[in-house]
Image: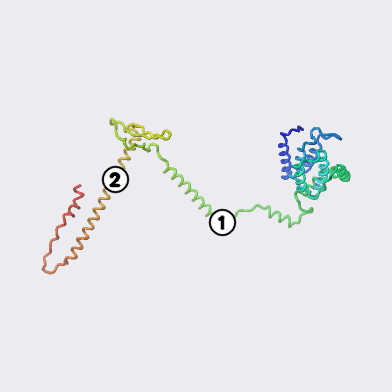
Amino acid sequence: EINQPHYNQRRIAEAKLLGELYNYRMVESNIIFNTLYLVISFGALPDSTNPIDLPQDMIRTRIVLTILETCGQYFEKGSLKKKCDIFLLFFQKYLFTKVQPLPIDVEYAIQDTLESIRPNITMYTTVAAVDMAIAEISPQLKNLLGNQEEAEETEEDEDTETEDQGEETPDEKEEEVKVNKKLEVVKCEEDDEFIAELERTMTSELTGRKMDSTVNKVNSSDLALPMNRGFKGHKIDGNSVQFSVMMKKGSKQQFKKMDIPVESEFASNLFDKQKAVVREREEMKRLVLSQEMRQEEEELMAEQMDQHKSSGVGYRAGERKQKPRKAPQLTTDMFNFSSGK
């Protein structure tokens, strides 16, 4: 053992780990008690100071308290309770080898740990009283610690809390078989409909996402360079188109002229878009004009019908049919509008 203060934290962590291993049934109780006795007795010499455990060193005391605080609550019945009670007597004797009185923090840690696992424990004030208590239990101590196999069997019976010994009745066996029988999945129409609906939903969702990703993809060749107001795209020498590209340097914006060949894909796409925009505007203009002309014609026809009805047109016998009046000049102009264009 190397009694160095910078190892103390690691030793406390290892003690905590050992206690947790017992809580999860990874180690047996005899390993815990062997470790506890080893901590308080390793290197001890009769009637002399332990050179690797000086009276002012409290690390071993803290290791014991850590183990008891972690798993000591499980030593409450049977042989484990007896083993723990015997160890606590030797632990009290070990405490008298330390400087008295004990440091206040160690004293409080001892009280808190013992109250959690043995609230009614008797605390001895002298070494003689502890030795007398140990002498009283010496006959029992040899028998208790000698039969390790019987203690382990008792521990297993207490920890696992098995059922009472005896043969199982046929009803118990049948019940156990029923409980352990694997459940069968019964298919029904509702489950099939739910699975089919879920698959349709997932398929439509994936398809929609693919469509969105396809629509949102922008071809780099279709991107138009930004034009400055003072330098709109125009041909230079008939072989290139000049653009003004906005560039940002720090917090300032700068415009740089850029010539692009007319035969390039970028310039041709730009020209095609401009032509498409012009065609769209002409078509929109034509539709608007034709709609207005149609509305004016309908209004004029409605006025003529009203005038015709108000003049009392109705041919009597012997009356001559009157010729229709000449259409107003406005109507003629309207009908000749398209031809004049």
Whether pointer 2 and pointer 1 mark residues with C-beta atoms closer than 8 Å, the reply is no
Residue 140 at x, y percent in the picture? 87, 45
* Residue 281 marker: 2
Foreground of the two, 171 or 309: 309
Residue beneath disc 1: 188
Asked if residue 18 lies left or right of residue 310, the reply is right
Report the residue at 40% width, 34% height from top. Answer: 252
Residue 156 position within the rendered picture, expressed as x and y whole percent measured from the top left: 77, 47
Residue plotted at (56% across, 56% down) = 188
Image position, residue 159 (x, y; %): 76, 48
The amino acid at mark 2 is: Arg
Q: Front-most of 118 and 161?
A: 118
Q: Indicate whether 322 appears above or below 210.
A: below
Image quadrant where one finds the N terminus: top right
Q: Secondary structure at mark 2?
A: helix
Count of labels shown?
2
Which residue appears at 16% of the width and 65% of the height?
Answer: 311
Q: Identify the residue at horizontal 25%, vertical 51% (top origin).
A: 290
Q: Position of residue 95 (x, y in %)?
A: 81, 40
Residue 21 found in image quarter: top right
Is the residue 11 above or below the residue 303 in the image? Answer: above
Reading the chain from its start, which is encountered first: label 2 or label 1? Answer: 1
